Amino acid sequence: MRAHTLFAAVCLAPLWGCAAVHDAPEHEDTASAELGSTGIGVWDSERDPAGDDTGGTCPHGPPGMVARAQAFPARGAVPLSVDFESKASQGTQARARWDLGDGAKATGGRVRHTYLSAGSYTVVLSLQDRFGQRVRDTLVMDVAPATCPSVGQAQVLGEVEHEGVNEASGVVDSRMNPGVIWVHNDSGDGPFLYALSHTGEHLGTYELLDASARDWEDLAAGQDPESGEHLLYIGDIGDNSETRESVVVYRVPEPRVLASGGEQGGTLSGATLELVYPDGLAHNAETLMVDPVTDTIYVVTKSYGGTTGIFSKPPPHLHGERATLEERAWLDFASSPLSGNATTGGAFSPLGDRLVIRTYGSTAYMWLRDGADTMEQVLAKEPCALSLPWERQAESLAFSVAGDALLSISEGPQAPINWIPLER
């Protein structure tokens, strides 16, 4: 049996006061409402030329409209991306404004919004036609808490072809170049970023100007919060002997690269950030992450004893600055529910709703974030254990640009590029 919603329309123009009540079928696969109990609307007088208002028309009035808000999908778990669509009666042209219930607002007949916090949200659609008549429609979105993903069957997309990439230590799935990944080598190489296709073809080598590569260990994606420019962060944070007084993070704009092939490359310049640990000690680290929600940089230390520190630098990130990192949390990868001891890579998802940290071998852990949870709140939760493909020296890990998979590349020549689906 199809559910029905009772809806009412009321003419807003002062000279044409009338009301009508109708029931309309709801679609089972979408959230849909037509002028619910809080809704008001204007009916089209052309429906009843005789002016009989018993059929739900406003006699003698200008063309009006009935509004309908739809959501696809109607429900789901965090992160829930929803396509909203507005409809007006009989093709009426109207300006649409949306209040999406979580503080976000949008305009347009079709809008997309992603809910990052669990809860029940009342969505309000407001339409206004060329006569100034206004109508409103509401619907409720129920968003469930996030759950641990299951790991699908890993796929080898290809092998790293370029002989110069023989110790890949950081990887990023490009945010602006579809089908392109960025990698860099561990210590021993120069200040170079390599652009590869998903199947391992070398697309270009890019040299960072005014930079050195003492011990590059990880790579992270970011975005300028003001300009929207896509950025790459390179962590020169390795310190096996634990003797460095400070570590360095480089930030450069991501260049345009064509995944279709052809030799490309050039030079890159950007910001240099010098970072000091708050305890005044030196720490070895192989994990660099950038939070897309807060634009905060995170450095995760590495210890074969399992004790791992999480340190952060808040924005802004200014060229030439020397900043003291903030201590955020400590994790013990030698104790349950964690395992694997030494941490070697990690990343935030593109939406910032998840973060993952890996260790050697095939062990990784994912923490789920609800809305604007702080790092302390996120790491206090029970992590999701993920089983990754075994790699001979696993030191890189990144989310796909869509957030629906993980990318992993081992150190060593002709390393396989592993694509690990995350299924909800």
Image (cartoon, helix red, strand yellow):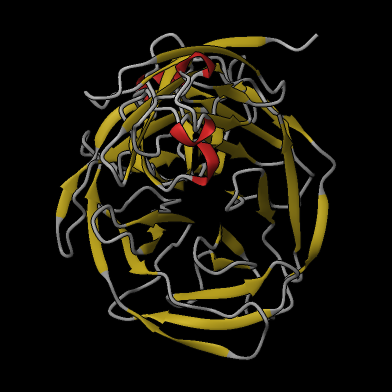
Relative image position of residue 9 (x, y in whole percent): 43, 18
238 to 261, vertically: above or below:
above
Relative image position of residue 301 (x, y in whole percent): 43, 39
* The quarter of the displayed image where residue 180 is located: bottom right
In this orientation, which residue lies closer to the viewer: 8 or 28? 8
183 to 292, vertically: above or below:
below
Relative image position of residue 388 (x, y in whole percent): 75, 39
Position of the C terminus by quadrant: top right
Res 108 seen here: yes
In this orientation, which residue lies closer to the viewer: 397 or 340? 397
For the view shown, which residue lies furthest in the bottom direction? 263
The mark total stands at 0
* The quarter of the displayed image where residue 342 is located: top right
For the view shown, which residue lies furthest in the front direction? 50
Position of the N terminus by quadrant: top right
* The quarter of the displayed image where residue 78 is located: top right
Res 329 seen here: no
Relative image position of residue 136 (x, y in whole percent): 37, 25
Residue at 49 percent across and 66 percent down: it is 176
Q: Is residue 44 left or right of residue 62?
A: right
Residue at 67 percent across and 81 percent down: it is 260
In this orientation, which residue lies closer to the viewer: 80 or 292? 80
Residue at 61 percent across and 29 percent down: it is 365
Residue at 70 percent across and 66 percent down: it is 198
141 to 304, vertically: above or below:
above
